[in-house]
Image (cartoon, coloured by chain):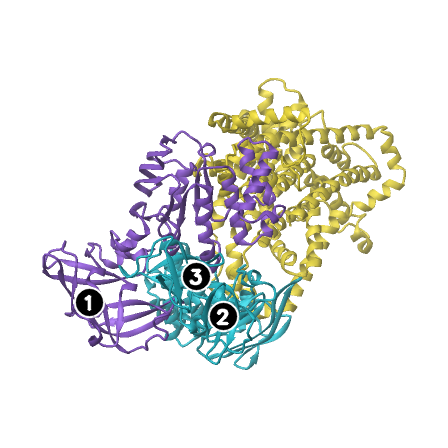
Chain colours: A cyan, B yellow, C purple
Amino acid sequence: MPHVQIVGLTKRFGSVIALEDVNLDIQEREYVSIIGPSGCGKSTLMKCVAGIITPDVGKVLVNGQEMRNVPIQHRRMGYVFQEIALFPHMRIFENVSYGPRVQGQPSQSAKALVDELLDLIKLNDRVDSFPQELSGGAQQKVAVSRALASGSALLLLDEPFGALDAKVRADLRYEVRKMTDDLRLTILHVTHDQEEAMSISDRVIIMKAGRIIEEGPPLELYLRPKMIFTANFLGEANFLEAKVIRQTSAGAVVQIGDMRLQTLEKNRGAGEEVIISLRPGFMSIAKGSGNENCLRGVVLGIRFMGHVVRYEVEIAGGRTMHVEHPLCFGELEIEPLDKVNLSTSPQHVMVYSVPERGLEKELQLE
Amino acid sequence: MKGAGPVRLEQGKRFDRQITDRFVNILDKLSASPRVSNLVYAFGLIFFFALVLLPPIFGIALKLDKVEEVFRDPVLLARSWSAISWSFILAFIVSISDLALGIPLTWLIVRSNPRWGSIADTLADIPFIIPTVALGFSTLLFWGPEGVASLFLGRALLAPGLALVMLLHFAFSLPVVVRVMVGELSGYRETFEIAARTLGAEPFTAVRTVTLPILRPALVASFLLSFARSLSETGATIIVAGSFENGPALIKNSKDAGLEGPLSFVSFILIAGSIIAFILIKYLGPRLKLPVSKVWPETERKLSRSSAILARDSVSLLVFILVVIAPSLFIALPSFHAVFDGTLKEALSGEGVWSTYWQSLMLSYVIGIIVTAVNILTGMPMAVLIARRRLGKAATSVIDGLVNIPIVVPSVALGVSLGSFWRTFGVLPEFLVLTISHLTITYTYFVRAMSAAIESIPTYMEETARTLGARPLTIFRRIILPLTKYSLFAGAILTFTRSVDETGAATAVATRLKTAPVLLVDWVKGTVAVSRSTQSLGVGILVAISFIGLLALRLVTRKRR
Amino acid sequence: MPSVRLVDIVKRFGAITAINRLSMEIADREYVCILGPTGSGKTTLLRLIAGLTTPDEGELYIDDKPVSKIQAEERGAVYVPQQYALFPHLTVLENVAFGPLAHGMNEQEALRTAREMLEMVRLGHRVDSKPDELSGGMQQRVALARGLATRAKLLLLDEPLGALDARLRQELRYKLRELAEDSGVTAIHVTHDQAEAMAVSDRIAVLREGRIRQYTTPFHIYMRPQSLFVAHFVGGANFLQAVVARRHPEESVLELHLGPRIIVRDTTHLSAEEVVVVIREDRVNIAESAEHVDSDRYNTIEGEIQSSRFLGSFVSHQIRLVSGDLLTSKTPTEKLEKPLPVGRKVVAYFKPSDTMVYSYPPIGLPRELRVI
């Protein structure tokens, strides 16, 4: 049950800094996802762990052993590629048994192992097919089995579901998580899909421009993101410029236009300019002007999204907010151009310092 | 780059540009009509069948009566069969050997140290650009009494004969293998190999069990091209053959002796045989099973070590330089010598044999230019037809196969057949028949280069352009041409150099007119008596001009890479 | 006057029928999503409308005129493939000016139009860049600007957001819709992502194996799916197998596997008939015990938590019911901060009016729902 340490990893490609001083500790049997926008370095990090890329500076340790001089084929890590990479000239059986065969295992035990793994993903009736004859989802499951058959307890998944339909992706990720739980593996999973990462990981690592920005359990990162980029990347958020009016022991009170909101933020000074973030799903919307602790505005548009109704509300000062409310019949009869108020509980108002580079640049997703 | 095409920010237009724009506009509207585009494709197809394919294949049928002569003479018959068999055996041995050296060289070029790699890459083009006549002469000298070996032995290391022919063929077919393999390996998705390694495979095992099987089509293709080149080459073979006879050598000897029988017989068998061999290899090749299930972890780990790779690289480079490059470049020495010993003055004066030389050179280049221009015009519609499968999958693969025939069939046999075809239809000037034969032989190169380039443009590019309102001619001018221009230049250069290089068909077809390579064969074999210096300079000048072609090709393809 | 009309379109590729007697109408300036799994025929449909391929049977009308004889260049329907197809050798400006120039506009006007379009998508500062210098989202905007620059009335988008990261997709889809609206075009947007379809379309056409299964507003697709497949493909749904125990004039009583009974508003199925009950995941609630639930208003079934998944704005619990079925319940994260632990005994409850009942499919439920 491997335990992986990444220490001070840095990698440059020409003038581009792909990784800058990345440190990460992955416990045994932990399922860790690394997410971030394209170009953030997550794939490069993964490839350094696997030995496909050699870092300029830094170390990768597996169970305390330094991996620098260990070539790819001796690192005993399963790797699943985004492009699936099943060998097109070999049947499913030969693909999955490739690892054991190539390591010199006797064919009997290799066959038993392969049968077991294919049984787990319910594809034993396709052993004689070629990869091209299977659907994308099935192919990727085979790729996972192939990686596992080579005998590793550490699995690296590099955007494994990128090439698949949304629905197939959504189902497959749970299957894979269950498989890895049953087999007691340590997983490193790279993806750009934040919902995917949050739904199956023990811990989520957020990367941007070659650095780790923030990390933590999914729920914690979602509810209380410490960095403004995390707040925007892990799910939708509304960002407003505000000013701190009062800092009390209960928390700071901020002012937006002529509206006020109570927060739980500590250690701010009166008069300080801040950015607040509110998730669309954490606000309640009601007709009328509400009480003191809310935002007032006018409904610009309403969209039925299925499990929620999405409201576009223009609040005083010309800013647009998005609110998502679960569908409740008859309880909310709001229509466009209605005057509404948006309320939220103080714990859901996140407060951030104004970013040096400006808000727009800081939030940029690509 | 910016400002290319119609996007120029200038006010007003010049009058002549207005006229050309109007003209192009009319053509553009015409191109949208299916009738017009069908006409263009039909033109390409008719040209191909009527001029390029059918005459050489069926012309030989008109000579079948001559074939009977051979059957009446057992000695001639035996000689003919021997020559034919040797052609095929030689081609096979040479191709296998070329793959054996070509594969490690490819790895050196693509995967090893970039500096050595690009040196090897450049060197690999040399035997391809140097006209085969020059290669033949250079090889003869290198291994002969005036060559390197003489420094140690005081006599020739290898006299003209089978061994020398084998080395020659090995040398000029190797670049074909390297070109194809390097192209394929450079474009190969390394993910497969890396995946194999993450599963525990040593690099050597990964290449053997995953990369090579996936690259099998390229292996088959390079084998085929190498095979065809060996079967076909005439000029250089004649120079180094001595008393050995393969098909082309026998045909030339028969022609000189006035023996129509063996000439026709061997041509006929060569045409039929090469087509059959081509089909067989194309069919069996992909079915060839490479050994992927057996693994030898210990041995393969050792073979993957950097010391093993160094050994592989050094040995292949050494063999390559000693057996291929040195013999090919040897001609430079006597040529330079000839420059300074007064032969150059003679040459430039145009006196005596040299006037014929310059005329022949002129003839070669004029034919080359005509042939290139015609092939571009008639080959373009065919390239589009094939790349975009306009006639449906089945018909396209048949046409694709047929387009390959001019390079599959030995050019000397093609020449014989062509000559007989056109002679039957009355008296055509020799120049015309000569040009047509060169056209036939080079047709394939341009079409293949262009169709591959067009195929690499995704169809959704054209489709999107269509929905944006662009008609076929506009799409061709503004999207396809700009995106394939490097391949177009490369194809054109390839066509030109191949035309200038041609000895076989030119030998077979013409009696009065001699292109440069044919003349040089006469000079070297002694049919026309000239001094060694004259021979060297004559060949040297041809080589020098061809090197300009090499430079152009390099520049164009380097931009691509 | 409908902008696009398809009547009984059939398209075959060899032995495969990609489009199987399909008819649909798209109104002028409507934004329609064609939603379906890979291989359902959505791209083929788009290409048929664009004129890049011709139907084997059936008629196609654009603005009430039959277009079977009209080539793709003349249809005024711009096709934007998933890969954008930006011409790599032309700059952004030249790319966007391509259409107007091809239509015969003179250079100056074409370039001016191109600049206008690029300003509209906020890329005026990148006119001289080459496509490969731009990010994915920017390339997508250039592709859209290029299509709109031709003043085409019909925009055909093939998975326009498919090549982008998940989060970017979410952000840009609304901009896409806005752009189409502002330009006054009719848009047909193909996707396999139902959340995307729900977020941007006026109407959604759910396609499966070359046939339209349902074609209506997001609201109706979600609330009144006409078939099990549609219910499964759009939005998360639960499927419970049951038998009709008793029929009443206003409601029916269904018996689930192993005994538990629920009341549904459906009365179209007969006694003893085998049915499938569909309940949307967000309509299933969880209570600690049955005492907290008004059993007059809700159906209640006991079970235990099998697993929970955190999905960001929602938490989803999988409940193993006493009937043996697995029920998924989606709760807003706001309401329920900590997911319930595995093994906790709970009561799942939902309103009778939140159920939809269908006959049990002859080919069996798993095959009926199969997405691949």
Alpha carbon of mark 1 to alpha carbon of mark 3: how far?
A: 39 Å
Q: Amino acid at mark 3?
A: Phe
- Front-most of residues B413 and C181: C181
Q: Position of residue B111 (x, y in %)?
A: 63, 59
Residue placed under numbered mark 3 in the picture: A161
Give the SS element for disc 2: strand
* A275 shown above or below A183: above
* C282 shown above or below C23: below
Residue placed under numbered mark 2 in the picture: A254
Q: Position of residue A1 (x, y in %)?
A: 45, 79
Let me know if marks 2 and 1 both belong to one chain. no
Chain letter of the residue beneath label 3 in the structure image? A
For image coordinates 43% across by 47% down, the residue present is C158
- Front-most of residues B157 and A134: A134
Residue placed under numbered mark 1 in the picture: C298
Q: Position of residue B177 (x, y in %)?
A: 61, 49
